[in-house]
Amino acid sequence: MKVAFGTSLLDRGLLKANENGIDGIGQYCQELLSQFKKNSNSPSISCYSFGSTYSHEKPYSLPSYATHAISALLRQNNHTIFESCDVIHATDQLIPIINSKPMVATVMDTIPLSHPEFLKSKSRFLKPLIWKKLTQRATRIITISDFSKQAIMRWLDYSDDLIDSIPLGVDQRYFEAIDSDEKNLILQRLGIKSPFFLFVGSIQPRKNLQRLIQAHQRLPRRLAQQYPLVIAGKLNWADNETLHSLQDAIVQKRCIWLHYVSERDKRCLMQEALALTFVSLYEGFGLPIIEAFASGLPVITSNCTSMPEIAGQAALFVDPYQTPKITEALLALIEQSSLRENLKVSGQLRARLFSWQTTATKTIAVYEKIA
């Protein structure tokens, strides 16, 4: 079986890897491709990329997506990679307009339709409708949680039997301890000298950073300075109030903003922090949760969308809209060492349930369904 596999967002991320790294979809593609190489039952994979000059595994380079769409409307598309494949896997919103081949589309969440307020684009009300029409061309949909599956059934009008819920994985390296001397050098380079809470993720409204900063500020007895909030993530977009809160917190030495960090640095932070604070308003999965679990890091997360499904009973849950409740959770983890230890143990057990190998194996099974 031959599969045309989309790597557009992965390639874009790799072009600027030193600045911003790759996003969640890019990581998903990267991990699947890595596992396909290891699996003797994998199909033949040919990568295609819209409008990218980066050569990831020598992908088939296509024109910009806009050019592709216009050519399709004029019935002028004649791309060898699609003609020679048995299945197309569209891993992002750049869905090929091809009628002659079965196609699986990965849809991680329905934010463009269900929560357009979480999108930055000026055309956030038009693009989702186009995306919906394009996604409905897929033979089957892969998503990453049962929560997202239910949302897809509602917002994309897909029936239950055409959607496969395949969780993401956590790489084995997150279970491996980094040498203490190396960790000390990394923390010194990053300017971190005390116990700290950790936030991992891009800065954007649905990540709920403003309420997290406010909750952290409410800690009594100058604990906010003793246990600063370390923020590891690039600025995607944020309202002025969030940036103002963040800047004030930095000045008052309650927060340290590292911007984008390498995976090695992220692993170090997860192994040295007091807890991961992941109180998003919406997640299709929440990969940092299981990465933290694997690292032996207690997790505070939200009691909504996919997060309870992913965390199971291994995290401390809060209502992300209730700032005092977030403060209570932060204080509990500062004061209760037994709570921290229990969460570490249950978290590592939970993380063992998620592997990229399983994700890849189940993805191949979807290809076989429609080939």
Image (tube, grey):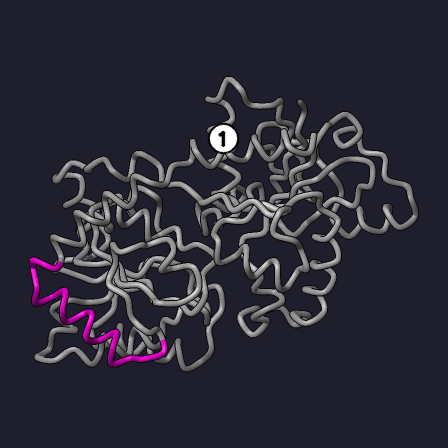
Residue that numbered label 1 is attached to? 361
The verdict on residue 298 being magenta is no
Residue at 68% x, 70% y is 123
Q: Residue furthest top?
A: 40
Q: Residue flagged by tag 1: what amino acid is it?
A: Thr
Q: Nearer the viewer, residue 319 or 93?
A: 319
Q: Is residue 30 left or right of residue 52?
A: left
Magenta region, residue range: 321-339
Q: Is residue 250 left or right of residue 194?
A: right
Main secondary structure found in the magenta portion: helix
Location of residue 148 in the rendering, given as x and y in whole percent from the top left corner: 52, 57
Location of residue 49 in the rendering, given as x and y in whole percent from the top left corner: 66, 39
Q: Quadrant of residue 218?
A: bottom left
Element carrying mark 1:
helix
Q: How many marks?
A: 1
Q: Is residue 358 left or right of residue 254?
A: right
Location of residue 319 in the rendering, given as x and y in whole percent from the top left corner: 33, 74
Q: Quadrant of residue 369?
A: top right
Residue 55 drawn above or below residue 280? above
Residue 363 drawn above or below residue 223? above
